[in-house]
Image (spheres, rainbow, N blue to C red):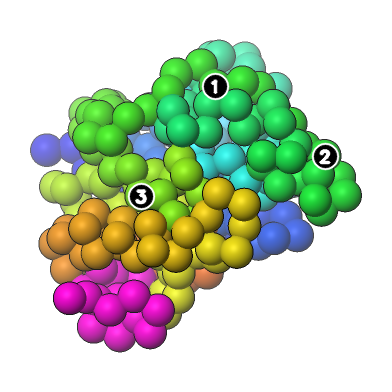
Amino acid sequence: MAHPTLTCFTLGPFATNCYVAACDGDCWIVDAGFEPGELIQHVRAAGLRPRAIVLTHAHLDHIAGVDGVRRGLKDLGEAPVWIHEAEKDWCADAALNLSQAYGFPVTCRAPDALLTDGQQLTLGGSTWRVLHTPGHSPGGITLHHEPSAQALVGDTLFAGSVGRTDFPGASFEVLAKSIREKLYTLDPRTKAFPGHGPATTIGREMLSNPCVRAQ
């Protein structure tokens, strides 16, 4: 059974965790933050074939490097951009992706494909499931690979915390529902790789996360 690997790069002024998910020589770039040069160099040095840029959500710190990654890896193939359907317009809208509010508008390539809850995605010989986990933003997703007990959770869940819900389009009630019904129902041994900060496990957060307790 194919076992995908995840390599994390913490990029830019927001210390955004961006990942290269690789399996059988194919890879996804999961979120592309500011200053993605190190990530690009890794993909090239590892001889990986980029198959997609998958966005867990479209806030500025997760999309600022999309166009740079595509340019830097163009000779290896045209990597399409995938995002949840609820944020299909955010890449091109500096107000929606919050960059306008920070004073430096950021836009990037419009998505090539829209993702939906429960959709299955193939990377090399591995199959991942898309979990719609809104709350931090309307189109937040988690990418779950059940056989290896790995989940890329974006800004939904952090080690000892959760994503902010004071942004436009955010809701703590929706976030808590996503965490309890989508993430806390995963195998407790699942390793959760967040958009900021260190990795954790679902079981650890169920037991000790002060923001959203398991019920």
| Residue 111: numbered disc | 1
Residue shown at 19% from the left, 37% from the top:
2
Instruction: Name which of mark 2 and mark 1 comes first in the sequence.
Output: 2
Q: Quick one: quadrant of the N terminus?
A: top left
First reached walking from the N terminus: tag 2 or tag 3: 2
Q: What residue is drawn where x is 52% and y is 33%?
A: 87
Residue on which disc 3 sits: 133
Part of the protein shown in magenta: 200-215
75 within the magenta span: no
Q: Specify whether residue 202 is painted magenta.
A: yes
What's the CA distance linking mark 3 and mark 1? 19 Å
Q: Find the distance from the CA under tag 2 to the CA under tag 3.
A: 26 Å
Q: From the image, state whether disc 3 or disc 1 is nearer to you.
A: 3
Between 187 and 38, the one lying in front of the other is 187
Classed neighbour count for the residue bearing mark 2: other residues with Cα under 10 Å, few (<14), some (14–19), many (≥20):
some
Q: Is 133 situated left or right of 107 in this image?
A: left
202 to 55, vertically: above or below: below
Q: Amino acid at mark 1?
A: Pro
